[in-house]
Amino acid sequence: MSAKKVTAKAAAKKKAPAAVEHLTHAQAKAELVRLALEISLHDKRYYQDDAPKISDAEYDALRRRVGDIEARFPDLLTAESPSQRVGAQPLGRFAKVRHAVPMLSLGNAFSDEDVADFIERIQRFLKLDEIPAIVAEPKIDGLSLSLRYQNGELVTAATRGDGFEGEDVTANVRTIKDIPNTLKGKAIPAVCEIRGEVYMRTADFLELNKKQAEAEDTVFANPRNSAAGSLRQKDPSITASRPLKFFAYTWGEMSETPADTQFGMIKWMAKAGFVTNPRTTLCKSVDEALTFYRGIGAERDTLGYDIDGVVYKVDRLDWQNRLGFVSRSPRWAIAHKFAAEQATTVMNGIDIQVGRTGALTPVARLAPVTVGGVVVSNATLHNEDYIKGIGNDGEPIRDGVDIRVGDTVVVQRAGDVIPQVVSVVLDKRPKDAKPYKFPDTCPVCGSHAVREEGEVVKRCTGALICPAQAVEKLKHFVSRNAFDIEGFGDKQVQEFYADDLVKSAVDIFTLEKRDARSSSKLMQREGYGEVSVRNLFSAINERRRIELNRLIYGLGIRHVGEGNAKLLARHYGTVEAFERAMRAAGKGHDSEAYEDLNDIEGVGEVVADAVVEFFAEPRNLKAFHDLLGEIEVLPVEQARKDTPVAGKTVVFTGSLTKFTRDEAKAAAERLGAKVSGSVSKKTDYVVAGEDAGSKLTKAKELGVAVLSEDEWLKLIG
Ligand code: IVH
C-alpha cells in the first residue's frame, strides 16, 4: 500500500446508499442497473480471475440490496437480475458442462435470530409442531465441484460456473487424492453425482506460495484463490503437484438415493470413498445448532483450513424435497456466516502512513496470516492513543495494554476491508519489547507532526511541501475562494502533478518560464493547443496580484477557512506584517504577538495554534517565500480600532434603502465591526430597515439597541 493513501478514510467518505424505502421508482430502476453492473464485475473477479476485490460481507450486502429493491418494486424484477442467477459465466478455457441438476447457492444468516427465523419458516412451510432435526456442517471456503459417476466410475468433474453450466475439469480432478475414480461398496447407484468443496489447507497454501514466490511465479491471495487457480490449470500435471483436498457434502442427480437423511447420505458418501467433514453434527434444537456454530467459530484458527461459516440443512430428505427452492437457494438450507474474522500473528514493525490531510496513521506490519480467507500482512493501529491502549474518549481500551513491536497480536477483519489489530497476547510478549514511540516528524517530508488538543490524530504540518498532501493542497490552492485560476482546476492539478510539472504552489507561477525553456511544450499535450496554453498562462498571470486574505486561505492551514483568513488579513493588513506576527507568536503562548492573534475576535486558540504551527515549520516558510517571489500580495484595508463601532457586533435586518446589504457589511467591517446574521445577547446593534421581522422582535426582547438606517449612518459618521 502506498504511503499516500489511507483507505479507511476513503471508505468512510464513501456515501452510504439511500435507504430502499426512500427510493423513488425511477431511482430504484437506476440503482438496480448500477448494482447489476457492480455485481457482475465482482462475480467476474471472483469466479473468473480468482481475485475478489471486496469482502464476502460487502458482496452479500450488494445482493441483499438488489433483493430488497425488487421486493419493494416487484415490477422491476427481470430475468437478467443478479437475484435470478448464481456466479458469472465460466471462462471459455475449458469445455462447458451443463449440470443435470443446477448447482445453486445458499441464503445467508448473520445472527441467531436469522437462524431461528429460518427454522420457523421451515416449521410453517411444513406445518410442523416440532423442531426439525438439522445437520450443521462447516462452510468450507473453497470452490464447489460436481463429480458425476456412472456405474461407479468418475466420468465428469465440473466446476459450478454460473450454477447451470460449469467447466469440465475432469482431467485435473483425477489427480486429486481425496476424490475416488471408482466408488467403493456394493449398492452404488448407476448415476451418482457427488458434490462438495475443493480447498487447500492453510499450511499447504503457505508452503505453495513460498515456492511460487521463489520461482517468481503467481503468488495467491488466499487458500481459496490458490485452490481455484490450481484446479483450473491447463496442464493436469500442474494440478497434480498442487495440494488440493476435497470434502463431499451434497449431491446432484442420483438414480437412487442410498439414504433418507442428510446425515445418512454423508455417512454413505464416506463409505463410498469420499472424505466428509468430521465436524458434521446432527442437531435437535436451534440451541444445539448455535452451540455448534460458536464452538467451531472459536476453533477456526486451529482447523487447518478456512471456513467462513456454518451450513444448516434439514436432515430429512423428504422434507428437503417438499421445501424445495426459492430463486437461487434452497429453503431447506442456510449459511450462517461468521461476523468478524480473527487470527493471531506477530507484529514485526509499525509503519506510518500519511494521508492527504496530513494525518499520520500507524500501520502494523504483520507476519502474513490468513484472516477469514484473506492473507493479511498489514493492519491499522488507528492512532497514537490506540497503540498506547487509550480509546477515543480517553478511557482505557484492552485493559490499558499497549501494543509493541514484537508482540503477538490478534488481527480482525470485519465486513470492512481494512484489517485491524484488536488485542495483544501478553503471555507471548518478548522480554525486550519496548513501548512504541510515535514519531514527531512526518515520515514523508520530515516536517514536524503535531497533535492538537482534544484530537487523537497527529498531523504533518508541512502542508505546502508534503508530497503525501500535495495534490489535495494544490487543489485547495487553486480553488474558487483562494487563487481561483481560470482553466486550472482539480483536473489540471492532478495531471500536472502526475507529470512532475507542478509539485507545489510556486510551480504554477513558474510554469510559463519553464515551458519556454523546455523542449516538451505544454502545447503538445493532449487537449492543449496554442490558444489554450496562452489562455492558461494569462489566467495564471492575472492571479499574480492576489489579496492577502485569498493567499492566507490558499495556504490550506488547518482550521483556517475563508472567514478566518479574512479576519487575519484585516487584522494584519500586509503580508509582511502577517508573517512577522506569526513568527513572533511562535515564541510562545505568553508572547505579545500570540496574545494579539488570539484576541482577534473570532480567531481563538485552535486557529491561532494552527497558523503558528504552520509558520514554525521551516519547510513551509521556504515554500511561502518561494511563492512570494512570484506574486504580489495586495494589502487589505485593516480593521480600524478607533471608530465608535470597532469591536461591536452588528446585525442588519429588514429591507435597507440607503445602502445595499453588501455595502453595509463592508463598511461596518472596515470600521472594525463584526457583522453577524443572527441576534443574540452578544449583539451590540441591530440596524433595522423596512419591514424588519423576527430579528427586530428578538432584539427588543433581549434589550439590544435598535438603530434606523439614518441613526446607523450618523453613528459611523
Ligand atoms: S451445500 C444448494 N454445504 O457454499 C446448496 N455448501 O454459498 C448446496 N459450501 O456453493 C450447497 N461448504 O461452494 C453446502 N457444507 C457445505 C458447504 C457449502 C461450503 C459452499 C459451496 C456453495 C456455497 C454456497
Image (cartoon, rainbow, N blue to C red):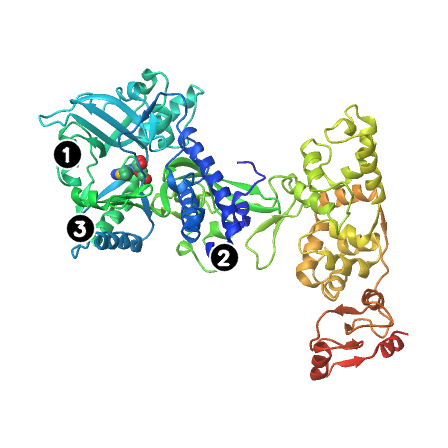
- Dot 3 lies on which element? loop
Q: CA distance from mark 1 to mark 3?
A: 20 Å
Up the image or down, 314 lies above or below 234; here it is below
Mark identifier at residue 115: none
- Front residue (pair 503, 449): 503
Q: Quadrant of residue 677?
A: bottom right
**Spot occupied by residue 482 in the image (x, y as percentages of width and height):** 76, 50
Q: Are marks 1 and 3 in contact (CB under 8 Å)?
A: no
Q: Nearer the viewer, mark 3 or mark 2?
A: 2
Check disc 1 and give the amino acid type.
Thr
Q: Which residue is mark 2?
A: 22
Callout 2 crowding tier (Cα within 10 Å): few <14, some 14–19, many ≥20:
few
- Dot 1 lies on which element? loop
Q: Which residue is mark 3?
A: 132
Q: Residue furthest left?
A: 186
Q: Residue furthest right?
A: 717
Mark identifier at residue 257: 1
Q: Earlier in the sequence, mark 1 or mark 3?
A: 3
Check disc 2 and give the amino acid type.
His
- Say how many tags the image has: 3
Q: Earlier in the sequence, mark 3 or mark 2?
A: 2
Check disc 3 and give the amino acid type.
Pro
* Residue drawn at point x = 32 percent, y = 20 percent: 239
Callout 3 crowding tier (Cα within 10 Å): few <14, some 14–19, many ≥20:
many
Residue 16 visible, this angle: no
* Residue drawn at point x = 27 percent, y = 46 percent: 331
